[in-house]
Image (cartoon, helix red, strand yellow):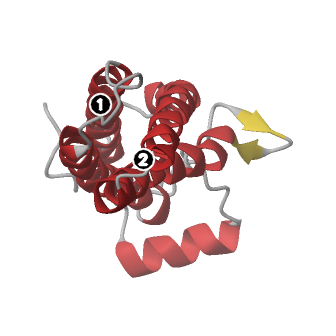
Amino acid sequence: MATLYSKVKVLGHPVHPMMVGFPIAFFSSTLLASIAYLASNDRDWFRLAYLANVAGVVTGLLAAIPGFLDWVGIPEHLKAKRVGFLHMALNLVVVGLFTLNLGAQGAQLGAAEPSGVSAVFISGLGVLLLILGASYGGTLVQQYHVGVDLTREQELMDHIHHGDRHSSHTDPLIQH
């Protein structure tokens, strides 16, 4: 089985998984604050949604850098490469949606009664895609062990229980 170590580490720990919690929290907060604004018409919720959106886009782009570098290090013939691409593509779409949302919210910051309907719709769609993209990230860690340093015993047990999922001989998504 191939060992797919993270390429970007701090004190031996992969950076990408340490960073992804921030955009997840900020994007989710954008949606929740947008819903709270619609329910209450309190502009503080609108401003909070906007600030959470800004923080989500910035931290999402920052988290993408080590994630991309880890993905580049996965050999082309492995199924993990395709799963990683889906994870990356979905999450870049999410960042794009929240960037679009930022533009829509930013244009209304000075309005007496900004409309929050588009913010709820766009951030709701973004969070749904975020969940899907995150599930691919979980698959990379749990199934393909990307960024996980297994002991020799763990590698042996994984191979016995699951076979060699990393092998090009058993991978149905291999492009020859």
Mark 2 or mark 1: whose residue is earlier in sequence: 2
Pointers 2 and 1 in contact (C-beta within 8 Å): yes
* Residue 166 shows in the view: no
Q: Nearer the viewer, residue 17 or 168?
A: 17
Q: Neighbour class for label 2 at 10 Å: few (<14), some, many (≥20)?
A: many
Q: Position of residue 79 (x, y in %)?
A: 28, 46
**What residue sits 31% from the left and 52% below the top?**
127
Residue 30's tag is 2
**What residue sits 58% from the left and 67% below the top?**
155
**What residue sits 68% from the left and 66% below the top?**
152
Q: Nearer the viewer, residue 117 or 66?
A: 117
Q: Position of residue 10 (x, y in %)?
A: 80, 38
Kindly identify which residue carries mark 1: 101
Name which residue type carries label 1: Asn
* Residue 114 shows in the view: yes
Above or below, 152 relative to 57: below
Q: Quadrant of the C terminus?
A: top left
Q: Position of residue 106 (x, y in %)?
A: 38, 22
Q: Nearer the viewer, residue 161 or 46?
A: 46
Position of 10 with respect to 110 (left or right) is right
Position of 156 with respect to 14 (left or right) is left
Name which residue type carries label 2: Thr
**What residue sits 55% from the left and 46% below the top?**
20
Q: Secondary structure at mark 1?
A: helix
